[in-house]
Image (cartoon, rainbow, N blue to C red):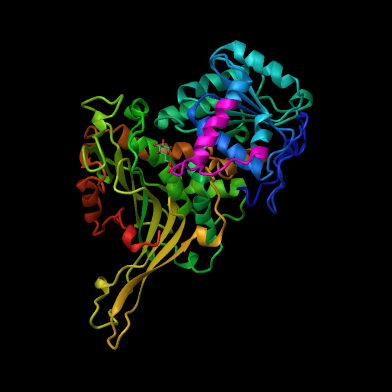
Amino acid sequence: MSTTPNTPTSASREPSCKVSAGPHEAPSSPAGKHPAPPCTLVIFGAGGDLTKRLLMPALYNLAVDGLLDDGMKIIGVNHGERETSVWREDLHTSLQQFAADKASTFHAGKLDDTAWDWVAQRLEYMAGEFETDDTFTKLKQKLNQSPGCNVIFYLAVSSRFFKPIVEHLGKAGLLKEGEGDASGFRRIVIEKPFGTDLASARDLNVHILSYANESQVYRIDHFLGKDTVQSILAVRFANALFEPIWRREYIDSVQITAAETIGVEGRGKFYEQTGAFRDMLPNHLFQLLGMVAMEPPNSFDAEAVRDKKAEISDAIQPLTADDVVFGQYEKGPAGVGYREEPDVAPDSTTETYAAARVYVENWRWAGVPFYLRTGKRLAARRTEISVQLKPVPFRLFRDTPVDALTPNVLTLRIDPAHGTSFDFNVKTPGPVMQIGAVQSSFDYADFFAERANVGYETLLYDCMLGDETLFQRADSIETSWCAVDDVLHPKTGGAIPVHGYPAGSEGPAEADALLARDGHAWRPLKRDAVEKK
Ligand code: BG6
C-alpha cells in the first residue's frame, strides 16, 4: 500500500528511462511520499473505456501530486491508425468531461493544465493488433530505444486478449528481467475478470506463469484501490477498541453489500455471459470479506498481508446452491427490466442480483455467517460492511428485554458515503429509565480534504514501486474460485433459480428468506433519512 511502501526492488530504484523532463515540472509530492521510479507504461487498450475513465484520471492525479518521475513515458497500443496528437486530444476531452460531471468518480472540477500538459507530453500512440507478431516487434524496437528501461504492461483489454498478449510479450523477450538491456523491471497488470471459474483461472495462471514470474504479475481488483477499503485494516489494527471483540465470541454476523442503482449500462453482451455472481462475488466481495476476516499480519509487507488473506480465501467453506439466491430486475419504479436492455436475450436467465451466506471455517470465525449481496438497479447505491455484535447477556432493564435492544452494529462505509457509523443504545432523556437506539458517525469529508480519487492511483503507484500488497496472488484467486465452483457448476440439482425483483427495489424476497432462516434480516438499502450521509 502506498502508505507503507515495500522496499522497492533494486531494479525499481534505478532510474533507467531517460527522456527529457520538458518544460512542465510535476508539482511536489505530498509529505512522506516520493515519486515512483521512472518507467514506461504500455497500455494495451489505449482506446478503451478503462483507459479514459480510470487510468488517465489516475495518472493525472498522480501527476498533480508529483508522484510520477520525470522520466515516465506512456505508450498506448490499440488497433487502428491514429496520430498521437489525436489520442491526446481525445483523452483531454474526456478528462474534462469527467472532471465537470458531478456523477463521475473523477469529479475534479477544473483540470490543472500544468499537470495535464505534464502527462500529455509523455503520451505516445502506437497502432497495433493485440494478437500479431508485428505489434510486439514494433513495441520492442520502441522499448529498445531506452535500454534497461522499467516497463509496466497494462492489459486494459477484454479478457480474451490476456493470453495472447502475455504469450507475445514472452516470446518477444519483453518480460525478461536481468542484466544489461533487461536490467529494468518488467511487470504485467491484469484486470478482472481473471477467469470465469476455477478451471479457467487455473489455466490462465499456468499460461501467464509460463512466461513471467509470479512477482511480475499484478492482478488488479479495483476495490482494493479504494481508501475506504484499505482503511478497514486501519480501523481494525490501529485501534485498541475493535480487535478484542473481532471474533466469534462477540460478533453475531457480518453483512457485506455492494448495491448499485445503475443497470447494465450498455454492457449487456458482457453481462449476459458474466452475471452478478461472477462479476462481483468471488472477487470484490471476497476481497472485502478478506479484509474483515484476516488475522493480523506480522507487518505490512506484501507477502505478510497476502499470506493472511490467502488463509481466509482458503478457509471459506465451499458454497452450495442452498447458500445463494439469484435475482433479475424486472420493470419497476427505476425503469425497464433487464430483459429489455440492449444486447440482452428476451428470455435471459442471467442474474443481476446475487446473495450468499458464507462461512469462514477457522478458529476466529467458526459459526459466524457472512451475508454477501450485490445487485444492479437496487433501491440505493451502497457499498458497505456491517458488523453486528451479539446481544448483551442479561436483562438488566426490566422494561426492555434483551431481544428488544437494538443490536450494536459497526458499519464501514465504502461508497458512496465514506466513513463509519456505530449503532448503540443510550438512556432516553426523562425521569424513566428507557433505552433508545442512536448512531454515531464519522465521515471522511469532515476530517480530511477528499479528492476526486478514482481508486487506480494507489494501484498504479504501488505497481511502479513494486509493492504487491494490494494485488492478488495466483493462489488466492484460485481458492476464491474454488469456493464458488459448486455454484457455477452444480454437481447436483441443476442451475440456481433466478427470482424477479422490481427495478429500484431492495432485491428479491427470496434473499430476505435466506437470512430469515437464521433469524436475521438485511439492513435496508434505503435508510438515508436516519443517516447523516
Ligand atoms: C466492476 C463490475 O468490476 O465493478 C461492475 O464489473 C460494477 O459491474 C463495478 O459496476 C462496481 O465498482 P464500483 O467501484 O463502481 O463500486
Side of 248 where 295 appears, left or right: right
In this view of the protein, can residue 354 be seen by the observer?
A: yes
Q: Percent position (x, y) of residue 231? A: 52, 55
Q: Which stretch appears magenta?
A: 89-115
Q: Percent position (x, y) of residue 138? A: 66, 14
Q: Percent position (x, y) of residue 240? A: 53, 68
Q: Percent position (x, y) of residue 480? A: 43, 40
Q: Quadrant of ligand 1?
A: top left
Check the picture and name the quadrant holding the C terminus.
bottom left
Q: Which is more toward the observer, 383 or 239?
A: 383
Residue at the spot 43% in from the left edge and 55% down from the top edge: 413
Q: Would you identify the image quadrant in which residue 113 lies?
A: top right
Q: Which is more toward the observer, 65 or 480?
A: 65
Side of 429 where 79 appears, left or right: right
Residue at the spot 36% in from the left edge and 33% down from the top edge: 265
Residue at the spot 70% in from the left edge and 16% down from the top edge: 141
Residue at the spot 20% in from the left edge and 39% down from the top edge: 500
Q: Would you identify the image quadrant in which residue 82 lies?
A: top right
In this view of the protein, can residue 314 be seen by the observer?
A: no
Q: Which is more toward the observer, 31 or 179?
A: 31
Tally the marks: 0
Side of 533 where 340 appears, left or right: left
| Residue 109 within the magenta-colored segment of the rendering | yes
| Residue 431 within the magenta-colored segment of the rendering | no
In the figure, 24 relative to 504: above or below?
above
Q: Would you identify the image quadrant in which residue 75 lies?
A: top right
Work out which residue is located at the far bottom of the displayed protein and give it: 431
